[in-house]
Amino acid sequence: KENEKLKKELEHLMNKEKHDQQIELLKHQNKISEERANYLKDMERKLKQMILEWRKAEDKNKVVNEIQNLLFKKNESQVVNKLQKKIDQKYAEVPEEISVGIKVKMKKNHQVGEVLEIRGKRAVVKIGLLPMQVDLKDLVAVKEKAQDSTIS
């Protein structure tokens, strides 16, 4: 009798452990899927931005090269640095609390947009034509730098 009781208890513990492992595996897979989805959204946004730049640009080859660098991860740090320098020339970070209506820069991909609304720890930011949800901790308030225009 005691043997059967121990055997049932052991089976129960093994089933519980197996179940816990399956839950952990699913959590891990969900995390990976979420990271992939975020990467794809980010890449889509960057490509749409590049397309807009391509339409405006006179030197189409330069923009095509930037798109190729973005897609094929060549010199990605150089592309990110170029984007960062471009943003830093236009905008200055300000120590302001993030609120609706102000301009913000995303820390990860150095894109600037306007806060449409705040939902808890996330903000809905409109970057170009696309509104997207971003964690507040990934945003920095920015102000457009005044253009140096001297009147003589």
Image (spheres, helix red, strand yellow):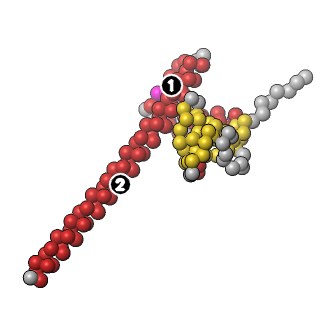
* Foreground residue among 74 and 134: 134
Q: What label sits on residue 27 in the rendered view?
A: 2
- Write the residue at 72% across / 49% down: 95
- The answer, for residue 145, to whether it is visible in the render is yes
Q: Does 91 sit left or right of 120 as displayed?
A: right
Which quarter of the picture shows residue 4?
Answer: bottom left
Q: Where does residue 141 sit, x and y in percent of width and height?
A: 67, 44
Q: Does 40 sit left or right of 152 as displayed?
A: left
Q: Quadrant of the C terminus?
A: top right
Tell me if residue 114 is in the magenta stretch.
Answer: no
Crowdedness near tag 2: few (<14), some (14–19) or many (≥20) residues, C-alpha within 10 Å: few
Crowdedness near tag 1: few (<14), some (14–19) or many (≥20) residues, C-alpha within 10 Å: few
Residue behind mark 1 = 65
Q: Where does residue 64 sit, x and y in percent of width and height?
A: 50, 22
- Magenta extent: 65-69
Magenta stretch: helix, strand or loop mostly: helix
Type of amino acid under label 1: Asn
Which quarter of the picture shows residue 104?
Answer: top right
- Write the residue at 55% across / 21% down: 54
Q: Where does residue 102 sit, x and y in percent of width and height?
A: 68, 40
- The answer, for residue 74, to whether it is visible in the render is no
Query: Which residue is most to the left?
Result: 1
